[in-house]
Image: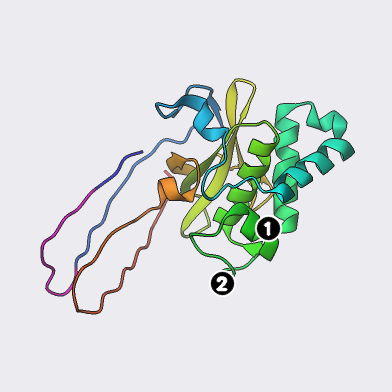
Amino acid sequence: NRVLELRHQRIESEFQFAIEIIANTSGNSLSRETLLPPTGIGAFALPSALCDLSPRIFEVVEQLKSSQSLQFKHYETRAELFCDWAFHNIEYSHDATDEKTSASQSLQYGKGVCQDYAHLMIALCRAGGLPARYISGYSAGEGQMHAWVEVLCEDAWVAFDPTHNRKTKPECVAVATGRDYRDVSPHRGKFEGQARAQLFSGCKTRTL
């Protein structure tokens, strides 16, 4: 992932910056070796801080495996089952979770936002034997950063949007890829001083 690091010793009143990115979209299917970290695919097969594999996660996987045994045999349809389950078991709510909420916690609350839907689906995939990774990017009509999931099905990464229970739209623009939100947070920083400070971020996107 591309990272921009800015350091300032002193800021009198405010600090602003803007980034313009032109990106080509590649649909919702990528080859197996695309965007792998040095550790390889294993990084997306194991639990991570926010995609924890709790007993409840494994219980859900076993229930789906028993009730949908024929669909479960095929990787992509298995991923579709996990996408559908995540969609129907979380209610979209802005105030129920934050950037530290794990998959099992959002499942316990029964509420969350796009990153929570993504974390839950990723956890289900990993518990169900499918490597899966977190994608942070932009989706037409969202108006802000969005999160979705890429699942390794055979030899291709297939993108799913569990917030809307579908595969991603072709115009979705991926910005960063990681194990979960912690790997791809859009901004992170540290402030030292006595003055009050506020951090604001926004985005404008258009499809060419």
Report the magenta stretch's main SS.
Answer: loop
Type of colouring: rainbow
Asked whether the viewer can see residue 85, the reply is yes
Q: Dividing the image into 4 quarters, which one contains the C terminus?
A: top left
For discs 2 and 1, the disc positioned in front in the rendered view: 1
Percent x, y of residue 9: 11, 62
Image spot of residue 6 (x, y percent): 19, 53
Residue 27 visible in the displayed image: no
6 is within the stretch colored magenta: yes
Q: Nearer the viewer, residue 47 or 155?
A: 47
Residue underneath mark 2? 95
**Residue 101 higher or lower than 184, as above or below:** below
Residue 80 magenta-highlighted: no
- Between the residue at mark 2 and the residue at mark 1, the CA separation in whole angstroms equals 15 Å
Residue at left offset 23%, top offset 66%: 191
Quarter assignment of residue 38: top left
Q: Which residues are magenta?
A: 5-14
Instruction: Say which residue label 1 marks.
Output: 107
